[in-house]
Amino acid sequence: MNSPLQSTVVAERRHSAPGESTAATNVLVVGVGGQGVIMISKVIALLCQQHRLQVKQSEVHGMAKRGGVVFSHVRFGEQVYSPTIPAGEADVVLALEWAEGLRWLKYLNPETGTFIVDTQQIVPPFACRNRKPGGLPGYDQLTVDQIRTRLPGILALDASGAATELGNPKAANTVLLGALSTALEFPAEGWQELIAGAVPARTVEINRQAFNMGREWALHPPTEAPRLDKSPPPASVQTLERSVHLEITDAWCKGCDICVKTCPERCLVLNAHQVVEITDPGACTGCRMCEWLCPDFAIRLHSSIPEPE
Amino acid sequence: MEPNHSNQAVAPVLNSVPGQSDGAQSSPETLALMGNDAIARGAWEAGVQVAAAYPGTPSTEILEAIARYPADDIQAQWSPNEKVACDVAIGASFGGVRALVAMKHVGLNVASDSLMSQTYIGVNGGLVLAVCDDPGMHSSQNEQDTRLVGRFAQVPVLEPADAQEALDFTRLAFDLSEQFDSPVILRSTTRLSHCRSLAKVGQRREKESLGFRDDPVKNVMLPGHARQRHPKLLEREGSVQDYLRNSDLIRWETGDTSVGVITLGPAYSYVKEVLPEVSVLKLGMSFPLAEETVRAFCDSVERVIVVEELEPFIEHELHALGIEAQGKAFFPRVGEFSPEVVRDGFRAAGILPGPVLMLDTTELDIEPLVRPPVLCAGCPHITTYMAMRALDARVSGDIGCYTLAAVEPLKAIDTCVSMGSSIGVAIGLAKAGTETKPIVATIGDSTFLHAGIPPLIDAVYNQADITVLLLDNQTIAMTGGQDHPGTGVTLRGDKTHRIDFEELIRSLGVTWLKTVDSYDVGALYQACRDAIEHRGVSVVISNRPCVLDPVKIKGPAFQVQAEGCTACQTCMNLGCPALTWSEARYEGRCKITIDQALCMGCTLCVQICPSDCIQTVAPEAR
């Protein structure tokens, strides 16, 4: 069980043969800015083009580089109209990040769709706002097993871990392409050729291995669910009762402003008498910065949380 | 998989179709083109000789793609703003060559002063404005509908639906411009500009230059001349309508006659997707309306539905003609369309039955993660806005990446209106006399050159007590790192004169000016503080190159010494994406960890960490 590629059981999956019917095949690639979503969708589009299929690929630029949500629709077949996939009609949702996969799950065809997802978790600064003791990141705590109750065919794999083990974390999306290649009926060699042409020469070999790894894994997936890379803190931390109170000795404060500028929660101000005052006691997390930095010992924090040694 | 060099490296691979370029058949080549690439290709094939633009999502790639064609074919350039770009194209048209100007929808507001007069003048060489709307505001401050400007200016508006049409219509637009003596607007939207589909391409047809035509009544808009030109505009509208009677631009697809759908642009593809059987009238030109064909179509069907993004433009035209038609009763007037939106609209209209099957995840209670775009790790804008917040300034912001500092954790921008408006707004705030906080305008280097110079002149002229913070990151970052007069490099990558901001600003009469390094937290705070204390106009230039463009900057990464971290969260106030929570806790709060792959070594967190526990990674561990 040392292989990072541990997964769930694969249920029935639809193999969409190119050109089999007039309905378009829909692949939705999702992830976070900078992960290579657009790159993956370009490879798929090029493969379709080589097979003389109509293909439309749609994406949104502009915010993509700035760590925001990135998605790319790829549709191919004999006749393709809309450049975007209607919700509920994606044959494959390929997610490069766990929470992004969950976000776009509603696009998946509930009966025949394949959900391929990297279990790596990218927690943005925005999700790190609950700074109170015991606070949890604003990141979904759902597990692979919970999703599997609704979606038995979920293909959840630690592609990033696998790629890191191969020696290049950036090959994670090639691992995912390997898994994707089992859900679309293009020959494996065609994928390999295209990927080799799209990556720097020195990484061709590592990408070939990454592709084979993903493909093998999807064809013969292990039966255990992979661990998501962040675990919730122990219950003892979550239930931490907090009560903090700032005691300010007005007579000792000379209005030097140090605590006001340092307070990470920005809840201290100087009042009209140039004496520090707490504006929002509820925002105070008890971090003790003001207490420690005050040159005049004018601030004391009373906390129910014992100070660690 | 890591792309070789950049995204663009794949494009040529994708664009060449193996097996089609060789072989004996001389069939036209088919390429997978993004809408913007197709517009560029169409312009090149039409024999365009001058093209200009100011970057703006989703239109930026048009000029970038044009610049990949030989310089001998097309003079391509970035201009400081859309009005200048439009005037350059107008000048080229006067000179008798075909010219294209590209911009986003709000850029047309800047250029419209010229357009409104040029429509009276008409053209000599063909003149086309490629204008990209942004329904849904993926990267814009409003979602205005350019068709209304088309009607306002009384110029024809072409509406391609996919890459093939973007190419064909662009080529046609130049012919129409010359045929009807009018500028022509080619309207795209984000979903066309940034969607890749197959298109058959042709070859360039060189247009022989006509040379300047000496005709003052036509070329010089004096009141007396303009009075003679205005009636010609109305005649022109009629001539275009006559042309549309027998034009492929209006496509009638006969189907089930119980419902007839009139649609245009990308909305057409959604209609065909969800309702393939009905009769469709696809309009390739939204203004002027192909009145005769539209009437005939409406007479042939029992019920008329108009499916158009944004404003009820066609719907109102139909109502004005006395045709009974429905549209915005079922389809939204705001936001971008999608197959789902169009499907819901037809369902509301009673044309499509029941709901669609979707994965039932209600029991799972998936809460979508809030993941807004953020300033990059090492972004030089981070410190400037930390300083603004610490100094408790009233900040009028401007358009650029730095607008992202308007939200937590930086939350240091109070207003943002339009390109270059920050300085004027700051002057107004100062003149209102109600503000107790120091007033600071923050503006990027390119935005300053776009529309920030006249308001700075105003500030000096009218002696406003404001501070201007010029965020010089030496590129147009938001649109993907384009050059501008402050970088000293042209669109085609040639070296040229580089604007010296200090010299420029002093020449406007600013006497208090200081340039600081954006990464020097202490120096930047001090400079901002001194500037605010100065009575009158003060300017601080905070200077550091963008970490992404023109080159991706990466230095040695830093790491948090976990034992020393007291989880105070001071560094988390930077909003740096390389900083995140670790599983370790101190007094119940999460300690911080640094993503080694993202950290580019800017040292901002190192400078502000009260526990001094952020350090370089030991060389052997790197």
Image (cartoon, grey):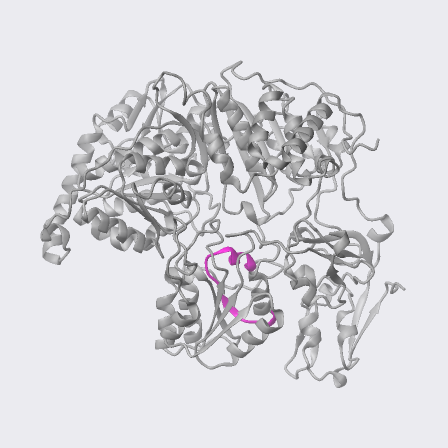
Q: Is residue A21 visible?
A: yes
Residue B52 placement, left or right of B367: left
Q: Residue furthest right?
A: A309
Query: Does residue B344 appear in the picture of this structure?
Result: no
Estimate the x, y position of residue B561 in percent, counting from the top left. Answer: 79, 59
- Give the residues drawn in magenta, as a range: B390-406
User: Where is residue B322, by image quadrant?
Assistant: top left
Q: Residue furthest top?
A: A20
The quarter of the displayed image where residue B337 is located: top left
Front-most of residues B170 and B495: B495
- Residue A77 lies, in percent from the top left, at 50, 20
Above/below status of A299 relative to B58: below
Residue A69 lies, in percent from the top left, at: 58, 43
Residue B392 drawn in magenta: yes
Q: Is residue B590 magenta?
A: no
Residue B536: percent from left, percent from top: 44, 80
Which of the image's four quarters has the N terminus of chain B? top right
The image quarter containing residue A111 is: top right
Residue furthest front as drawn: A202
- Residue visible at 67% across and 56% down? B556
Residue beneath the point at 22% across and 51% down: B91
Q: How many marks?
A: 0
Residue B276 drawn above or below residue A138: above
Q: Is residue B318 left or right of residue A279?
A: left
In front of the other: A2 or B455: A2
